[in-house]
Amino acid sequence: MATYAELKAKADERWQTLAHGDRAWVRVGTAICGKAAGASLVVESLKAELSRRGVQAHLSEVGCLGLCYAEPIVDILKPGKPRVFFKNVTPDQVPELVESYLIHDNPKNDSVLGYLGEGSLDGVSPLDQLSTMKKQIRIALRNAGHIDPLDIYQYIANGGYAGLNKALFELKPQQVAEEVTKSGLRGRGGAAFPTGTKWSFLARTPGTTKYMLCNCEEGDPGAYNDKGILESDPHTLIEGMIIGGYATESNYGYIFIRHGHEGPIERTEKALEQAYEAGLLGQNILGSGFSFDIEVSLTGDSYVSGEETALMESIEGKRAMPRYRPPFPAQSGLWGKPSNINNVKTLAYVPEIITRGGDWFAGIGVGRSKGTVILCLSGNITYPGMYEIPMGMTLRQVLEDVGGGVPNGKKLKLLQTGGPLGGVLSGDKIDIALDFEQMAQAGAILGSGGIIVADEDTCAVDMARVLVAFCQFESCGKCFPCRLGMTHLLEVLERISNCQTRPGDMELMQGIGRSMTLGSLCGHGQLGFNPVQSAFRYFAEDFEAHMKKGRCLTGQCTGLHITPTRTRP
Amino acid sequence: MSYSSQALREQARKALHLQSHRTVTVLSSLLAVQDELGYVPTEAIEEVASFTDSTINDVWGVASFYTNFRFAAPGLHNLEVCWGPTCHLLGAPRILQEAQHSLGLSGEGETEDKRFTLRYNTCLGACSQGPVINIDHRLIGQVTVERIRRILTELNGSPRS
Ligand SMILES: Cc1cc2nc3c(=O)[nH]c(=O)nc-3n(C[C@H](O)[C@H](O)[C@H](O)COP(=O)(O)O)c2cc1C
Ligand code: SF4
Ligand code: FES
């Protein structure tokens, strides 16, 4: 069995050949957003062109740098040159790129996004000085877009599995949990519960079979950071999970992913295979005596299967309906055994926390919100992307300095944060800091980190209707305040949207909302009135225009509704 | 393509036995069948029940809960249109309207000639490239009305690659 030092030596040697060898290294980001922008076709085209021109180069598919606005991104590292990032590359530009930069040395600077490393390019700034990069602190995303997620040695060469090695050989399980507690890390799946504390619950529960579960259901529209991590750097999650397993003295893990997301699933499965081969998973990891297994569990389409107890039902192969609590998962979870559940992002921070120490992590952020938050900006924003931002920055700084503001000279109207249940936030309330408590006070949630930006042409009624349509469609149907409440809310919102309001509709919705908040079993129903309540709080005039004047102020309520109404049988 | 009842059963059984994950459940079995056949015919429900030692009722319960399961043979091409809030803001309603119009459909389902299946999706995970569609497992972002019209016209003339 290889020791960590042996693995690291092998990894360093391979990295040396790739990054400092005598061939060029060409990397293309092929995570979900890259693919949607056509990156797979760019890869095909590069393969063909490199072989046609007889260019000797390494070609790797990497994950996501998070700069979605510049996808597809091709980056080329030639011996003795800085690493040059080309933006918005189309398949038909590939022959010219190969000709001008790989064969000759002319990068055509106007197609360059930035560069990294020694040297300089006229009129081009270093990648880490771009407005979209400068304010980021990349911890969970430290390798994203830089390494090939299908090559475990690239991860190890960049410091991967050092945290696990340290945990296994220098720390007792309890010390690992304490380090995580010290870091102030809180869950990134929505509820922001302190991770170290959660781990100590499971550690204290006796039992020979305990489970460590990782939640990558990620059904929130507008969020793709969990899938982004799995596609870009699956080993950071796997390492975090093994460390979590050691800290909680559990021996089996499941990574829970929605079926159909082929990229994240394939890359995670492959990474697991490699971790087993390297002796980082399975029996007696690195000779430490600790054993841990992980498998991927796929779920069908169901948003609520991301709720922690529904997730267990789903892994057991049943309908994903939340369970009553107590008993809590730490006592009785998956198959009745003690279990712990964390979000992908939460676990992805753990390796660096162990390597660098809890104090280091706690030094980033503000108040009780430590570290960074991984935001996905989408909608009416100049630079949509996935950004890892230190806690404490304001929403305004994120939107304006990083996201580049609302395009086309339009005004910001509203934000939808933290998934549909988070409701909407008014565009003039963005001077609040990225901080779990401050966001909650403003009536928004940080949740999964999705931020959907909407400009002045957006109707708040229409937005509320779309969010409620989602919640209605996804209600699991177990309890009636949510199942019927959502359906009823949607019906009323459809009426308002179509300017066919009936007297008392507002009061009717308030009543339904109260019943849902009070009488629902899980967060889906308890928070399900948020979209309506928040939209009404900030944009009462939009509602009034529909209800009293019979018109939509933006003309967006066109009746072109996509409303897949369905109640789960 | 249509298979005889017996052939469907055999294919379903094969898929059930070839499952690669260690943990085999009703849900994992249904996903395996759907991946293999493109849908879950009644024969497969029965096979899953006997394979997982569950009742037919239980299997139906699971299959009807997760919205990805379908119970009729899919068309040759599979088009999914995202209606998530980001895509909605960026023009999904018009993309969907065009898709329905081009395919002669008024909602989800198969075209009469069985060349296309249209499905809605709550988020295809590429929101930053919205509006997004997925056609035969290929994601396409920044879709315009013209672009989807062109894609559908091209596909209408060609078999699935
Ligand atoms: C309706 C609903 C859906 C949820 N979906 C997710 C999800 O997709 N991913 C996730 O990590 N947490 C989700 N959660 C939160 C989980 O229940 C749980 O709090 C979380 O996975 C715990 O991980 P953390 O401590 O690392 O945050 C959801 C909760 C509810 C009520
Ligand atoms: S609140 Fe809604 S989603 Fe949650 S258990 Fe009840 S019906 Fe299901
Ligand atoms: S909302 Fe359409 S891809 Fe996410």
Image (cartoon, helix red, strand yellow):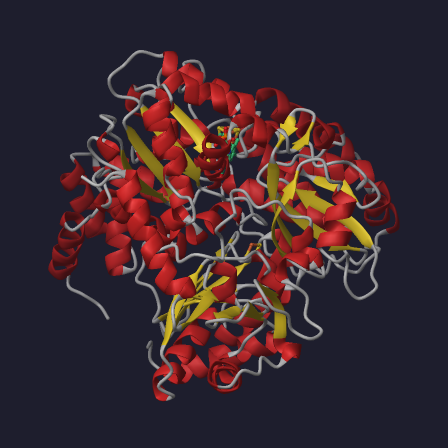
Q: Nearer the viewer, residue A355 or B60?
A: A355
Q: Is residue A34 visible?
A: yes
Q: Position of residue A266 (x, y in %)?
A: 33, 54
The image shows residue A537, relative to residue B112, as above or below, that is above
Quadrant in the picture for the C terminus of chain B: bottom left
Would you place residue A29 above or below residue A506 in this image? below
Where residue A369 appears, as percent x and y from the top left, is 64, 29
Query: To which quarter of the image does residue A524 belong?
Result: top right
Figure check: A503 above or below B152: above
From the viewer's side, name the closer residue of B104 and A275: A275
* A26 or A150, nearer to the observer: A26
Q: Looking at the picture, how far across and down is residue A109, in whole percent?
A: 64, 78
Report the quarter where the N terminus of chain B lies.
bottom left
Q: Nearer the viewer, residue A19 or A429?
A: A19
Q: Tell me the residue at 63%/24% (across/down).
A: A517
Residue depicted at x 26% and y 44% = A6
Please give the count of numbered marks on the rendered protein: 0
Residue A191 appears in the rendering: no
A204 shown above or below A464:
above
Left or right: residue A307 versus residue A246 is: right
Residue drawn at (56%, 68%) of the image: A85
Image point 45% across, 83% down: which residue? B154
Q: Describe residue A179's horizontal placement relative to residue B34 as left or right.
A: right
Q: Position of residue A129 (x, y in %)?
A: 68, 58
Residue A417 figure quarter:
top right
- Please indicate whether residue A202 sits to the left or right of residue B59 in the image: right
